[in-house]
Amino acid sequence: MTSKKRGKIIAIEGIDGSGKTTVSTEIYSFLSSKGVPIYYSFEPTYTKIGSIIHRFLRGEIPLDSHSQALLFAADRLEHLSREIIPYIKQGKNVILDRYVHSSYAYQGALLNDLKWIMTINKFALAPDLAIYIDVPPSVAIRRIRKKGRSNISVYESVRFLGRVRNIYKSFVKKGELIEIDGTKEKDQVVKSALAIVCKSLKIKLL
Ligand SMILES: Nc1ncnc2c1ncn2[C@@H]1O[C@H](COP(=O)(O)OP(=O)(O)OP(=O)(O)O)[C@@H](O)[C@H]1O
Ligand SMILES: [Mg+2]
């Protein structure tokens, strides 16, 4: 057993194109440049299970809706046991570009059975901090198009993302997610998220 203090799990959530990767990688770079022990990771992963999900998201293979939910949950458990838990045990904080609330929001919107989604994810550790970047779906989709990304996910439609957003908002109401305004300038969004993370890690860097 290590006597080190356990690291924290910090999740960055939001709909496609909301700015999760921008925010989580900037926070990672900033904190590591200051010597704060931090590791960056994302979901779905590129393990065997995660790779099936990526192929589905790119539209290469079909997947039954319930199988999608089960694969996301299984990918998360692999992620936890192989990477997240070993890192937090070493005292490293882990910043995650999507985590369990992505399953609640996306598969919840898809299947309309949040209770079951929560049941299949019950073995996933709750995040210590989860930040939700709020942007309207139309803004998010405009950003994705502007970026000219070739791998448009099968989930990216204004109507579907609107339902995903509503579920995220319900978790903000419950107090599980901290909402930030993702429509602001990039630097401003990163700054707001960083301030919340620093407060949670009890570090004074800003
Ligand atoms: N606050 C912002 N204002 C304007 N554009 C932004 C902002 N944040 C990010 N972007 C741009 O929007 C695009 C999507 O951002 P990003 O890739 O970080 O989103 P994401 O949530 O990780 O998306 P995905 O779910 O598709 O991975 C990028 O081109 C990024 O540079
Ligand atoms: Mg991303």
Image (cartoon, rainbow, N blue to C red):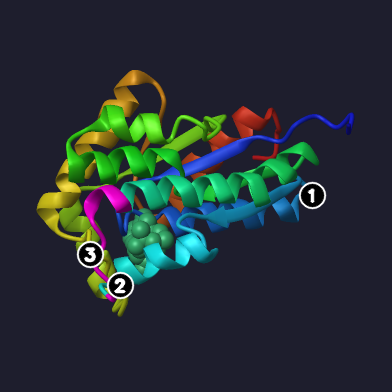
Q: Residue 126: give x, y in percent of width and height.
A: 52, 30
Q: Amino acid at mark 3?
A: Val
Q: Are marks 3 and 2 in contact (CB under 8 Å)?
A: yes
Dot 2 alpha-carbon crowd within 10 angstroms: few under 14, some 14 to 19, many 20 or more: some
Task: Decide: is 62 above or below 161.
Answer: below
Q: Amino acid at mark 1?
A: Gly
Q: Quadrant of ligand 2?
A: bottom left
**Dot placed on the residue nearer the N-terminal end, 3 or 2:** 2
Name the residue at 47% across, 54% down.
43
How far apart marks 3 and 2 lie (CA) works out to 7 Å
Q: On the picture, is 146 further left or further right than 187?
A: left
Q: Position of residue 10 (x, y in %)?
A: 56, 39
**Of circles 3 and 1, which is in front?**
3
Query: Residue 12 at x, y = what percent?
Result: 46, 45
Say which mark, if any, is on residue 154: 3
Q: Residue at x 19, y 41 (%)?
A: 111
Residue 46 in view (yes/no): no
**Is 57 placed above or below 44 here?**
below
Query: Between disc 3 and disc 1, whose residue precedes?
Result: 1
Q: Secondary structure at mark 2?
A: loop
Q: Is residue 204 magenta?
A: no
The one nearer the camera, 145 or 127, is: 127
Which amino acid does the dot numbered 2 rest on? Answer: Arg
Please say whether residue 67 is visible from this viewpoint: yes
Vertical relation: 157 (above or below) 115: below
Q: Secondary structure at mark 3?
A: loop
Q: Which residue is mark 2?
A: 58
The mark found on residue 35 in the picture is 1
Tell me which segment is drawn in magenta. 60-67
Badge 3: residue crowd in 10 Å (few <14, some 14–19, many ≥20): few
- Mark 2 against mark 1, which lies toward the viewer? 2
Ligand 1 within 8 angstroms of badge 1 C-beta: no
